Image (cartoon, rainbow, N blue to C red):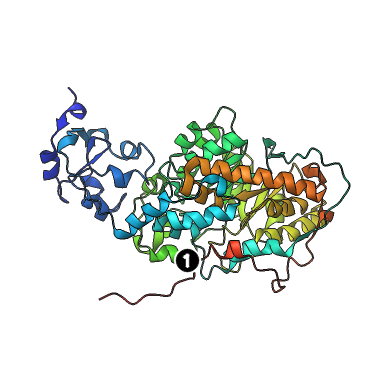
Amino acid sequence: MSSAEQVISGATIAAHNSRESCWIVVHGKVYDVTDFLDGKCWGSKIILKYAGKDATAEYDPIHPPNTIETHLAPEKCLGIADMGTVAKVEIKVTEEEKARLDRFALRPSLDEVLNLHDFEAIARQVMPEKAWAYYSSAADDEITNRENHAAFHRIWFRPRILRDVTTVDWSTTILGHPSRMPIYITATALGKLGHPDGELNLTRAAAKHGIIQMIPTLASCSFDQIVDAAQPGQVQFFQLYVNKDRAVTRRIVQHAEKRGMKGLFVTVDAPQLGRREKDMRMKFDAEDPAEVSNAGTKVDRSQGAARAISSFIDPGLKWGDIKWFQSITKMPIILKGVQTWEDALMAYDYGCQGVVLSNHGGRQLDFAPSGIEVLVDVVKQLREQRGLTLPNEKFQIFVDGGVRRATDILKAIALGATAVGIGRPFIYAFSAYGTDGVDRALQILHDEFAMCMRLLGAPTLKDVVPEMVDAANVKSHIVAVPGDTLYLNNYQDMQHAQLRTL
Ligand code: 173
């Protein structure tokens, strides 16, 4: 019998509960993690909390499967725990958590959910507080976050009549791949904070609806697990945070390509993470995703989930690196987080295949403009300075941020975007309802498309032309717009610092 197969009693495991010798149990196996207590990989504090005990429940939400095996030498797996005798860490169910679970049980049925705002309103009440703080938070005063949605209100339609709209078709191609709607599921980190299946909820619903999912670098599920969950032929893109260690970056990119990713979306708006104060007020004590553990960098846990795991990102990323990316991959390269027409033109000149006009869901620089506003400039300048008309197969423009309705999406399409990224609404959907929630969210968008295309007088997306919108006011940030109560009611007031309790 190899040592990894020996059964170890709870009492033996419990004796190894200190810095000097620290064993934990994960999924029934006993690991010696003493060497990790220097804080190099996982937080020492949290490991010690589980020393001599079963850590599975805390470990699972954040770690991709096999993380332990990847990072520990094989001999550190000591054997199989005699689970009947292993001490479980008391997870105290607080009064707040009990109340949350009661609210969770009272969720409305999915057919009562009528629009994407509903998911946000429901998720806010039923998802764990930490998850809500992380997903919903945005930079500083959250002005850009609100502007992302509000900017769509400054664009109005010019609908056409008496066109045969018996059949309407809102399918398209994105980077040459078919998509049943001009949208994709954009990258968002830490899916398991909201639901145990994390990003897999998105993969499954995307397959059902013929929609493309962009896999995030900082997913809670492992990259391979998300790719393995896809149906044969299902198209996925990959979002990249560039690691300071370019050997790591190269390995990640080439692995993504080998696993069939159809586009590399390099995030360029996050050399440092914005201050997301709702998230920062939650002391982040969960564990690190694999990407962070791999980098072996020090984790600052005092400033929220995102800051805690972002230190591997390279602030030195620069235009000159684009050539390097082009030399290590044949995937189309799209810069995600472009915020001016000047940079969009540079991306074109550097031979990128596209840009995402995005401010990272308002989570980076507050008062960065909305993607939809930048789109108007980019399309104009690409036409005037590069002779490029949009949409264009050669260089595709995407927009994300604040999208909640098919009308929002159709405005972007009319103005020249190929497709629009949607992030938070799908996380809220799966946090409250799992895969069925994302399925419902996509179905709602289909229904909205059918109606909007007919009412616009556009049988296909090719008929959704610039003349169908009036974007003259998109830059006028002070025009009055009707109050948008569904959307605005989803926002809680920003909180000031609190007095300490005695
Ligand atoms: O927006 C984010 O929260 C995000 O992209 C991120 C970046 C680094 C670490 C964690 C999340």
Residue at figure coordinates x 17%, y 43% from the top left: 87
Residue at figure coordinates x 62%, y 49% from the top left: 421
Residue at figure coordinates x 80%, y 53% from the top left: 386
Q: Is residue 215 visible?
A: no
Which element is circle 1 on? Answer: loop
Direction from residue 371 to residue 217 in the image, left or right: left
Above or below residue 83? Residue 382 is below
- Looking at the image, the residue that sits furthest to the top is 1
Depth check: 487 or 414 in front? Answer: 487
Direction from residue 459 to residue 480 in the image, left or right: left
Q: Can residue 48 be seen in this view?
A: yes
Image quarter where the C terminus lies is bottom left
Reading the image, the residue beneath label 1 is 275
Instruction: Say if disc 1 is inside 8 Å of ligand 1.
Output: no
Residue 15 in the image, given as x and y percentages of width and height: 11, 44
Residue 462 in the image, given as x and y percentages of width and height: 80, 43
Callout 1 crowding tier (Cα within 10 Å): few <14, some 14–19, many ≥20? many
* Residue type for callout 1: Arg
Direction from residue 73 to residue 225 in the image, left or right: right
Direction from residue 346 to residue 102 in the image, left or right: left
Where residue 205 sits, quadrant-wise, is top right
Residue 103 in the image, given as x and y percentages of width and height: 41, 54
Residue at figure coordinates x 25%, y 54% from the top left: 92
Image quarter where the N terminus lies is top left
Above or below residue 310? Residue 501 is below
Residue 358 in the image, given as x and y percentages of width and height: 62, 57
